[in-house]
Amino acid sequence: MALNAGSGHIASAFSCVEILVSLYHGGILRVKPGNAAYRKRDRFVLSKGHAAIALYAVLADLGFFPNSRLDKFGKEGGHLGVHPELNTPGIDVLSGSLGHGLSVGSGLALGARLDNEKYVTVVLLGDGECQEGMIWEAALFSSQHNLNNLIVVIDYNKLSATDFLKKGLSAQALSKKWEAFGWQSIIVEGNSFEKLLPVLRGVHGRSSSKPLAIIAVTTKGKGVSFMENKPIWHYRIPSGNELKIALKEMFLTEKDVNYWKGDLS
Amino acid sequence: MGSLAKGMRDAFFDTLFSIALKNKDILLLTADIGAICHDKFRKSLPKQYVNVGIAEQNMVGLSAGLALTGKKIYIYSIIPFLAMRCYEQIRVDICCMDLPVKIIGIGAGFDYSTLGPTHHGTEDIALMRFLPNLTIYSPSDNLCASEIARKSSREDGPAYIRLDRTGYPPIYRDSGKINMRLGFSVVKGGKDLCIIASGNMVYTALKVSGRLSEHSASCGVIDLFKLKPINAEKLICAIKGLSHVVVLEEHCLSGGIGENIAALFLSQMGQCPRLKLLGIPDRFCAEYGKRESLRRACNLDVGSISNIILEWIKK
């Protein structure tokens, strides 16, 4: 998609692929691909909206919309943009501006509570995104209102768009911060299905009255050696030799990127 | 004059309360800004009232999430903390998703006269006007505020509603005169000129009209209570044949309804009347005292406005 459109945040997407696949393919989120607007569905908010390219692939794979839609990602006449919008089946909340998702997610969770609905709301935040003040307004609100049907997954890849967050918070310190705001908090390896799934399986019918923050320790650009932990790859499309290496490392061939009509050389 | 004690805020929320009693999907959210008229929500409808705390940006996002679950949300705070502090949240979370969230800004113009520029609501209409999907209302009195409460509860999209705290004498005796479909009402006819005013300035405009009549000038008054979209075609019909039109607002001149109406007239009328735009000049108002004193400092009191208009029409 990103190659085809010449646009997209590949490294941010690779960082959270395992989280998204666990949530959707792992059967954590109770959703109906054939009936995306199903009222009792679990809600998902991709607050780090720039990773939508990964979410689209997951949603298409589950049948929310045909794969052919992916071909027109970011293109004239297409429906999928770099950031998700409500006109895409399976997208519950428009996002793209960082910091908003937890507040909107809190509203979804409060709405479920008021209607006595059992669905949960899962919000995927970036670690860099946690620099936004609005996140902490929402964190305080949702714990004060005991929204235990609200789950945050933080894609803790230690990078923001242009820099490392090494001067920021360690995973442990971040975890303590959520706890100080009245949340239950768990740190887990975020690029591992084996580690993620057991934690995510507990999101429904939680006994704790607190909302839950899962700090998923990930690698930005996971799976492509030259993209991993390199700020420059936040918003960059590989070409030429870079692309050849990337495809090889992902066990793909030119044939696998069959929607791509560009030149590999 | 019982209506003097109660302001348009009370009228708005009293009506909203009676609607909310019959519709559990209507919720009122406040960012720790109190009002006595909110007490009955708090007491009788505790599940439909949330004090979000001093976190306006979160309140906007929260309202969007609630609206996505099928609720109709009213959010409430002082104008600058809502319309200005939360501009991008309103743009993205409410307007981009076209959700039924009604943004209630309290403290129109210099309503919070003694609290200084941080609390003055003087640039909100300009900001809100730019946002697609957003309807804007600015009631002129209690009855008008009630009608807007009723109308907004039936409309699906987002709205911005600008209210006063304080009570003023009524403009309307019965709500039949308030044409919600049109978005404005001719509250007084005039042969020579007309003042198009919004909000509490309609009352000022009526007084100015009285003053002008002492100088043999027949001045009509139009209450423009729906500021977006403006029914330009009908408004142009209403001022047809007049040589002079004044637009009066308790809002900065930049981006206000004066500019908006000037653009509409220029682009849609073959021959424009002469226009005078009256509002707050390009500065913060650091004067204190009653609302009237601040208006006087900006030449927006009855005397100043009347003199400006008299000199203007003589030319």
Image (cartoon, rainbow, N blue to C red):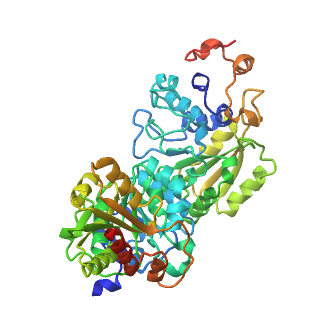
Query: Quick one: which residue is furthest to the front in this view?
Result: B315
Q: Quadrant of the N terminus of chain B?
A: bottom left
- In the displayed structure, does residue B313 sit left or right of residue A136? left
List x then y, in percent, for residue B102: 40, 60
x and y percentages locating residue B46 in the rendered image: 42, 71
Tell me which residue sits at (46%, 63%) in the image.
B253
Position of residue B160 relative to residue B106, above or below, is above
Residue plotted at (53% across, 73% down): B119
Residue B110 visible in the displayed image: yes
**Residue A127 x/y as whole percent:** 69, 47
B213 or A251: which is nearer to us?
A: B213
In this orientation, which residue lies closer to the viewer: B90 or A69?
B90
Residue B248: x and y in percent read: 37, 68
Residue found 39% across the figure and 46% down from its top: A39
Depth check, front residue: A112 or B304: B304
> B303 or A237, which is in the foreground?
B303
Q: Is residue B208 left or right of residue B34?
A: left
Above/below status of A68 relative to B20? above
**Residue B150: quadrant of the picture:** bottom left
B159 to the left or right of A151: left
- Which residue reaches farthest right? A167
- Quadrant that contains the C terminus of chain B: bottom left
Q: Report if residue A115 is visible in the image.
A: no
